[in-house]
């Protein structure tokens, strides 16, 4: 791995009354690839093609790693984390810029910046990191690695989570074919 990801465009959303079970709105039946699943999701932002896996947690109730493509641009990948808590957030935080550390296998440390918002009582945090095309190398590691570890500061402390990458290559590639096929069917109408 050459270098590290230093600057990524970051979008952070907080879901106030969501649960992880409710996350995939109008989702088609997921297709399994190892520890990963791929599905098409129709949500408020339009159609997304998502590959996701559940994490092995340190102090969280549930965590999901999601790699998705928008129906608007099949070439651009986005990385999202969903963190659910047993206990609700205890602090209101309007905007705090923080860093997350990601490692794949024994590779380089990737530090990404995100904005953190919190409202007392929230139980689900969604962290979205947009991947500019020049950072394809990170997503290649993600597709071919065995395990990814993320350490983030949320809900007043450091949280660690590990994700199996078994099946990630096939699942991420399937999002590409689903997206391209959907775009081709729009053109054929």
Image (tube, rainbow, N blue to C red):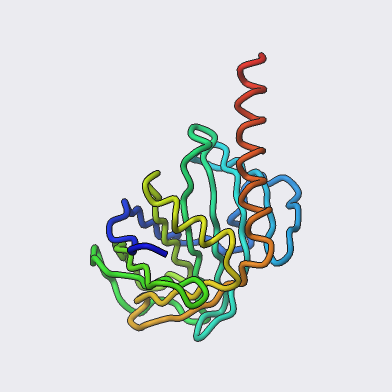
Whole-percent x and y of residue 124? Answer: 48, 67
Number of callouts: 0
The residue located at (63%, 47%) in the rendering is 173
Whole-percent x and y of residue 12? Answer: 36, 57
Whole-percent x and y of residue 111? Answer: 33, 68
Q: Is residue 20 above or below residue 158?
A: above
Q: Is residue 121 above or below residue 177?
A: below
Q: Is residue 114 left or right of residue 127?
A: left
The residue located at (55%, 58%) in the rendering is 66
Whole-percent x and y of residue 33? Answer: 73, 59
Image quadrant occupied by the N terminus: bottom left
The residue located at (72%, 45%) in the rendering is 28
Q: Nearer the viewer, residue 145 or 47?
A: 145
The residue located at (49%, 71%) in the rendering is 104
Residue 51 placement: quadrant: bottom right
Image quadrant occupied by the C terminus: top right
């Amino acid at each position: 791995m050459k270098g590290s990801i230093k600057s990524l465009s970051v979008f952070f959303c907080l879901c106030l009354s969501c649960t992880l079970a409710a996350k995939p709105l109008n989702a088609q039946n997921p297709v399994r690839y190892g520890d990963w699943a791929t599905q098409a999701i129709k949500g408020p932002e339009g159609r997304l093609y998502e590959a996701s896996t559940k994490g092995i947690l340190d102090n969280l109730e549930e965590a999901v790693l999601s790699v998705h493509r928008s129906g608007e641009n099949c070439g651009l990948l986005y990385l999202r984390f969903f963190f659910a808590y047993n206990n609700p957030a205890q602090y209101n935080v309007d905007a705090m810029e923080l860093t997350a550390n990601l490692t794949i296998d024994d590779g380089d440390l990737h530090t990404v910046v995100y904005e953190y918002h919190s409202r007392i009582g929230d139980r689900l945090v969604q962290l979205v990191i947009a991947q500019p095309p020049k950072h394809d190398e990170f997503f290649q590691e993600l597709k071919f690695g065995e395990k990814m570890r993320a350490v983030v500061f949320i809900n007043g402390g450091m949280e660690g989570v590990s994700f199996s990458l078994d099946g990630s290559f096939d699942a991420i590639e399937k999002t590409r074919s689903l997206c391209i096929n959907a775009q081709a069917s729009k053109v054929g109408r």
